[in-house]
Image (spheres, rainbow, N blue to C red):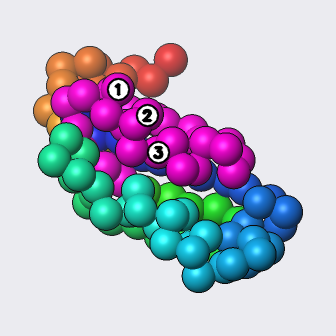
Amino acid sequence: MLFHITHTQDHITCPLSASNPEVAFASYSSPLDGNEQVKILGSWISGPGHQVFTILETDDVAAITKLLRPWMSLGDVKVTPVDKFEILKKLDAFDKYLEDPM
């Protein structure tokens, strides 16, 4: 399954505010490496907005929680299951919606 992750922190919990930013960034970026259970497909950052956006793939939701623990104490972590839009286009329900959206 695919998941979209949005992590939001503030200027206080930003690794740049840590007493040792280099160590803080190493810990902060560790989820972006993925692991045997979670494959990272891509990751983007909005530095000024204090946000990280990541797409990952896994069949184990608990593995997501374990992987993202370093972020959980720094701010909000939103996990949203997603799918490729091409999959939706193949569904009969989507075809019916296109014929009569209301």
Residue bounds of the magenta highlight: 55-84
Which residue is labeled 1 in the image? 62
Q: Name the residue type under label 2.
A: Thr
Whole-percent x, y for residue 70 in the image: 54, 50
Q: Is residue 66 left or right of residue 89?
A: right
Q: How far apart are marks 2 and 3 (CA)?
A: 5 Å
Q: Distance between the residues labelled 1 and 3?
A: 10 Å
Whole-percent x, y for residue 12 in the image: 85, 63
Query: Residue 11: in sight, yes or no?
Result: yes
In the image, which disc is placed on residue 68?
A: 3
Whole-percent x, y for residue 53 in the image: 50, 59
Could you say whether the residue bearing mark 1 is in a helix, strand or loop? Answer: helix
Q: How crowded is mark 2: few (under 14 residues within 10 Å), some or many (20 or more)?
A: some
Could you say whether the residue bearing mark 2 is in a helix, strand or loop? Answer: helix
**95, 44: nearer the viewer:** 44
Which residue is labeled 2 in the image? 65
Chain-order first, disc 1 or disc 3: 1
Query: Residue 83: in sight, yes or no?
Result: no
**91, 96: nearer the viewer:** 91
Q: Is mark 1 in CB contact (under 8 Å) with mark 3?
A: no
Q: Judge whether residue 77 is colored magenta.
A: yes
In the image, which disc is placed on residue 41?
A: none
Could you say whether the residue bearing mark 3 is in a helix, strand or loop? Answer: loop
| Image quadrant where residue 65 sits | top left
Height in image: 72 above or below 26? above
